[in-house]
Every structure is written in structure tokens, then in C-alpha cells.
Image (tube, grey):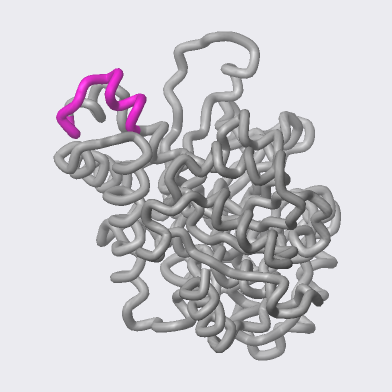
Amino acid sequence: MQTAKQFYLLKLKQKLPTFKRHIYNELKNSTAKLTAIYGSRGVGKTTILMQLLKENPLPKDKKLYISCDYPIFEGISLFEFVQEFNQKGGEAIYIDEIHEAKDFEKELKLIYDLLDIKLYFSGSSAIALTNPDLSRRYSMYHLKALSFKEYLALSYKIELESYSLEELLKEHETIVYDLMEKFSNIKVLKEFNDFLKVGAYPFYFEDKNRYIDRINDTIDKVLYIDLAKIYSILPDKIDTLKKLLRVLCVSKPFEYSVEKLAKDVGITKSTLYKYLQYLHKAELITIVTNEAKRFANIKKPDKLYLANANLLNAICINSDKGTIRETFFVSSFEKKHSIYYSNRGDFLVDEKYTFEIGGKNKGFKQIQDIPNSYVVADDIEIGSVNKIPLWLFGFLY
């Protein structure tokens, strides 16, 4: 306990960014006894935990930050540690990397059932933190990679609003005019093209020169530490997962059949399906199903995307422009929106809106006569009627 408090003191001395992520206020106002933050490695979960801790009005000795990947916690019962802190007057504890703790699901259940303490916790792996039995006991919040809006706010230290999908569709021209007044000398199309390559992870602002290297380091940690531990995957199989990511990076979303993809990677179809689910849950890829699968068990192939456009830039040298656009569009939607790829148009969102993605000259031919249909065009600053700039979808959160 004393060693943990010494680490806590050191952590308190670290300078924190003043910028707050899109879920910060919801987390701060959570009344749940246990509150979880989950998301991919590198998206800023530790920072948001420390911001929450520092803004908690409790005296410093009544609250504590720990990280379960510290060596001092190896072999330690999480419940017993939290119990001791609670018995000595502790009222709130902030636990990072909780999936590193042994049997953490059971330990959290005991804490929930037996202790009177407020607990925030985070984990780098969405896989371990979305256990249905465990999730009934806590409020769960998903921290995504930076949106284009957040990237601009951090780059230029300006305050920007998010917009609901409905606001964006109905008022996109007015929204752009309002944003351009705030942007002043910001060239939005240049910034957007830059953002597709870099800036999706907050550590970009710590060391821009090593950003791509750090993305690859993050991918390796997800594969060789998170997935290997949770699913007991052998190192040679992890290499297969890495190869799978490279193959997806250089292909168009619909280019590979399951049979061809399995053959190129060197695994069976059943193993491929399993590995794709691992990568999806770890937030390295996104699986988008066909709209027809909503109603029947139709054998339509899924579309596979890397989780954000920066991963395309990190894993392969050149990516198809259409793939980059679609990857950004898919990654812009939070989990509260449903998204399918469509037989007419590219995507169906919330089972209501049809979107066709393309360049600035993209027309309405593919989606004509479809109600609630829109062209989402790259390389335009402002749209008109049902033609909306692609970059504006970076303001959904």
C-alpha cells in the first residue's frame, strides 16, 4: 500500500493536458458505483482517469490511482488491496490496465458486492471488459481514437462542438459556415488530409516524429500482450494475425473472398473467422456486414476495414484512396449508430440513411430515388442539399 501511494504521488506530479475527451463529462457525472472506460491502447484512457481523479473534490488521501501492470501488483489480490484502502478511509480508487490483474472479473464482483467505494477502471482490451456478466454491474464508456474535431481542437487550442447525425444531415451548410468563422486561417482540407495520415491517437502531440513508430508499437502490444494473454495465442499465431492486418491494408474492402484471404494468410476458414473476431474486439479492424443480414442468414461476405485511417498509413506504404475514405467514414460513427454496407449506395446507417462515398465530382446516380440518401464527397469544403463534405463526419463526437 505504501509503495502504491508513492507511485500515486509521482503520478500526481505529472502535467496533464487541459483538453477533455468526448466522454469526459459523462464519466465525471456517472453515479455508478463502478465505472469502466474501455478502448484500444493509445487512445488516452490513463489521461482521462487522472483528469477525473484530480477534479474529484475528495482530499488526496481519500482517493488513489493504481495501474495493474506495475510489478508490485503481480500476485496481489485486487479485492484485498481495495479493501485495505477502503478500511483506512479511502473513498474513491482509479484503476488502470485492470485486465492485467489476475481474475479481475471475480475481484470486481467482490468489490461491487462487499465494499462501499467509488471505483473507476480502464483496460486496454475491449475484449476483456465487455464480458456480459460483468458489464451488468458497471457503467461502461467507450473511448475511441481522436475524431477530426478533437484533432483540430488540440492542434489549434480552440473549442469546437460535436453534432448529432441528424443535425449534420439537416444543417450541414450552416454548420460549415459557423465552423469557418472559428477556423480563421485553418485550411480545413489540408488539415483533413493530414489527419487521415496522422493524429488519430493523442500521443501524436507528444512526439510527432515518432508517431508512426508508436502506432506500430501499439499494434504489437495489442497483438503480443493483450490478445496473446486473453486468448492464450502462441507467438507464431500472433505473427499470422499481423500478416492478416497487412493483407487487409493493401486490399480494397471487398476485394478478398474468405477463401482467398484464408489461403493468402495460410490458415483455415474457421481459424480466419476466429482471428477476425479477435482483431475486431481489439479494435484493430471493423467488420461491416451487409444490410440483408438484418433479416435472414444470407451468405453475403463482410467488408473488413482497419479501425482508422492512420493504421492504413502505419501498416502499408500506399492505400487505395477509396479505402481511405470509407475507413474514415466507418470509423467516425460511435457504437450508438448501426452501420451496414448497402446493395445500393455504400452504407446504410441506423437502418434509415443511405450514403454514397466518393470524390468531389461524385454524383447521385447510384442512389437516385432512394429516400434519405446522401453523397458524402471528399475534397470539398462545403456541400449543398444532399451532398455533404466527408470531413464534416469527423464532428460526430
Say if the magenta span includes residue 270: yes
Position of the C terminus, as image quadrant, is: bottom right
Along the line of sight, which residue is nearer the eye, 116 or 52?
Answer: 116
Task: Tell me if residue 179 can be seen.
Answer: no
Q: Position of residue 394 (x, y in %)?
A: 64, 61
Name the image quarter holding residue 343: top right
State the residue at coordinates (70%, 49%).
34
Image position of 172 (left or right of 135): right
Q: Position of residue 194 (x, y in %)?
A: 47, 73
- Magenta-colored segment: predominant secondary structure: helix
Task: Tell me if residue 94 can be seen.
Answer: yes
Q: Position of residue 112 (x, y in %)?
A: 70, 43
Q: Is residue 374 above or below residue 257?
A: below
State the residue at coordinates (61%, 83%).
17
Say if the magenta span includes residue 380: no
Along the line of sight, which residue is nearer the eye, 306 or 371?
Answer: 306
Q: Position of residue 270 (x, y in %)?
A: 30, 18
State the residue at coordinates (60%, 67%).
148
User: What segment is highlighted magenta in the picture?
Assistant: 264-275
Along the line of sight, which residue is nearer the eye, 206 or 389?
Answer: 206
State the residue at coordinates (63%, 86%).
156
